[in-house]
Amino acid sequence: MTYKDSLTQAMHQLAEDPKVVFIGYGIRCGGQAAGTLKGIPEAQLIETPVAENLMVALGIGLALKGYKPVVFIERFDFILNALDAIVNHLDKINTMSRGEFKPTMILRVVTGNRLKPLFTGETHTQDFSEAVAKMVTFPVIGLREAGQIGEQYAAAKARLVDTSTMLVEYKDLI
């Protein structure tokens, strides 16, 4: 199975749970997350403006209401815009509220392509996995092989009762 097929299958397996919602820009129209969200019910797709901090904050709010957000950030480079929500809120609300609130989500983050079809530039291909992993207490996992995608997304969904997960995809592999 190809990398893209594995991603598509993992997204459709997540979508079997009606509490899973996908949040991001270009997920209802445009590229639909490189086509991996095609066929997902529209009620589970929340289109946002290009505003990564807003996307994560929306996910936190939905998680507090019992949903299981999957926030799609198409360019890892722009995670920097969302670090306040990720580091100071998503990762800390449970501790700050002394366990009263425990929002969790899956952060689906894509490192841009360097090889195909064209190099998209230095500001669209950075991988901040190591830096983010040092700032948060939840797992940050790179998906470098198609065979690990389904397993890692299933494990991330299972962890949603306790913690968030950031899964990093590599566009050159799609």
Image (cartoon, rainbow, N blue to C red):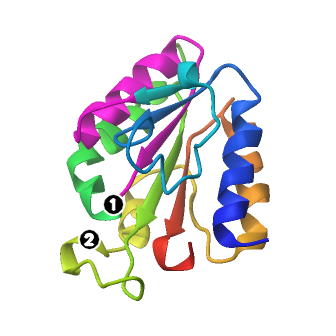
Mark 2 and mark 1 in contact? Answer it, CB < 8 Å: yes
Q: CA distance from mark 2 to mark 1?
A: 6 Å
The quarter of the rendered structure image containing the N terminus is: bottom right
Q: Quadrant of residue 48?
A: top left
Where does label 2 land, which residue? 124
Label 1: state its secondary structure. Answer: loop
Rendering coords of residue 146 (x, y %) = 72, 72
- Disc assigned to residue 141: none
**Camera-nearest residue between 2 and 125:** 2
| Residue found at x 31% / y 75% | 126
The magenta segment is 47-75
| Residue found at x 58% / y 19% | 67
The quarter of the rendered structure image containing the C terminus is: bottom right
The kind of residue on which mark 2 rests is: His
Q: Quadrant of residue 90?
A: top left
Q: Can residue 96 be seen from the camera position used here?
A: no
Residue 19, compared with residue 24, is above or below; it is above
Q: Quadrant of residue 3?
A: bottom right
Left or right of residue 170, residue 145 in this image: right
Where does label 1 land, which residue? 75
